[in-house]
Image (tube, rainbow, N blue to C red):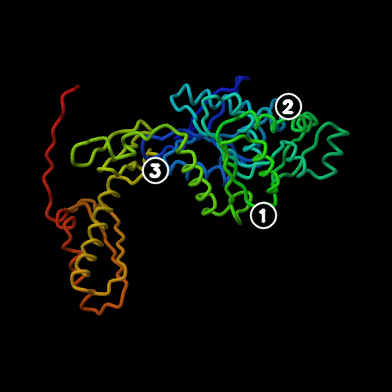
Amino acid sequence: MKRQGDFEFTLEDGRTVSGLIEQPQATPRGWALVAHCFTCGQDGLAAARLSRALARSGVGVLRFDFAGAGDRADEAGAASFAADVQDLIAASAAMEAAGMTPNLLVGHSLGGLAVLAAAEQLPQVRAIATVGAPADAAHVLTHLARDDLERIEAEGETVADLGGRPYRITRAFVEDVRTQSTRDAIARLRRPLLVMHAPRDEVVSIDNASAIFVAAKHPKSFVSLDDADHLLSRQADADYAAGVIACWASRYLPALEPDLTGDEGHADGVLVEETGGGAYQARVRIGPHVFLADEPESLGGLGSGPSPFELVSAGLGACSVMTMRMYAARKGWPLERAAVRVVHSKRKDQTPADVFRRVISIKGPLDETQRTRLLEMADRCPVDLTLVRGSEVETELLPPD
């Protein structure tokens, strides 16, 4: 079944690949292609977390399964590094045709080497970043047991266990990775390159990052991932890597769109407009602030933002904590932190039908009188009073133009 956010494109051999688009909350400041590691896939931990963190930074991302992911393989049913590179080129062409020209290539592990090889044929790409990438495609062979290599030599193929998953490795694949000359391609790039690597990476040693960095021409940068593991299994490590990539690449990405800078000059109030993504996704602009509103997947949306009633609940919760904070500050009371959880529900055949259940947490050395008074102030916050008293909504329809 096709998922919301899927992006389909066709390979040279006629097969259709379905990738996943990670859409930023505002107009993308650029587009990236993220290539996963040899044993991962588009939903692998590192690829998914890097893509989502880049999207939060304002960069649109496409990630997809290419040869070697298990779901895709060459027509012989085996992994192929050369096929990975061609898949990236095909994906880039499809993105460009769809108005999402990739400016940034990001590759993890062997995917990092694939983006370096593909970049030579992608002049529209302005910057490349690698995370834990080997310096040579043949590095993957170091993870094969001696028995596997001997069986490939004798029988032409074997099924090897890599990362806990079976892969059919053929003699053609071994010859393919051994003949790749990616270091020459790196030297010819002459485009901004960011090399990220963890010094204690036990899967791909730091020496590989040094070799890539030395082969590349300036401008080039190296950033250590400190004690991260190869798969970036800790959320903080993936977020850090993506944040550094987004910040570094911003120098080479297109200029920010007005809705990202807050300089669009819209009139007062809140502007909500459809994005065209999914059935209900809408972009909300409040002055310099931009975010998405949506319906959950269970109601046919993408789940990419709060629903309308969640936004109303957020307004009530925010107003409650702000009112308590203002009152405590005015009284000089030791309120350390206030938190409010709001849940909206509907009551059938009752008036009013809508119920906003508010649960308040107040922390600090407050006596019972102070706590009671702060609760009373939450009940008197402006949004609470607006909801209780009711409001009038005036509507105007603009002319067709």
Amino acid residing under circle 2: Ala
Q: Quick one: which residue is furthest to the bottom in this view?
A: 367
Residue 111 placement: quadrant = top right
Counting residues from the start of the chain, the first of labels 3 and 1 encountered is 1
Residue 152 - label:
none
Q: Nearer the viewer, mark 1 or mark 2?
A: 1
Query: What is the CA distance from the residue labelled 3 to the residue labelled 1?
Result: 37 Å
- The quarter of the rendered structure image containing the C terminus is top left
Give the structural element (helix, strand or loop) at label 1: loop
Give the structural element (helix, strand or loop) at label 2: loop
Mark 3 and mark 2 in contact? Answer it, CB < 8 Å: no
Residue drawn where x is 30% and y is 44% of the image: 289
Q: Position of residue 350 (x, y in %)?
A: 19, 53
Residue 106 placement: quadrant = top right
Amino acid residing under circle 3: Gly
Dot 3 surroundings within 10 Å: few (below 14), some, or many (20 or more)? Answer: some
Q: Position of residue 236 (x, y in %)?
A: 51, 54
Mark 3 and mark 1 in contact? Answer it, CB < 8 Å: no
Residue 76 - label:
2
Counting residues from the start of the chain, the first of labels 1 and 2 encountered is 2
Q: Is residue 371 left or right of residue 225?
A: left
Residue 303 - label:
3
Query: What is the CA distance from the residue labelled 3 to the residue labelled 2?
Result: 39 Å
- Depth check: give the residue in front, 180 or 367: 180
Counting residues from the start of the chain, the first of labels 3 and 2 encountered is 2
Residue 200 - label:
1
- Depth check: give the residue in front, 165 or 292: 292
Q: Position of residue 73 (x, y in %)?
A: 67, 30
Amino acid residing under circle 1: Arg
Q: Quick one: which residue is furthest to the right in this view?
A: 154
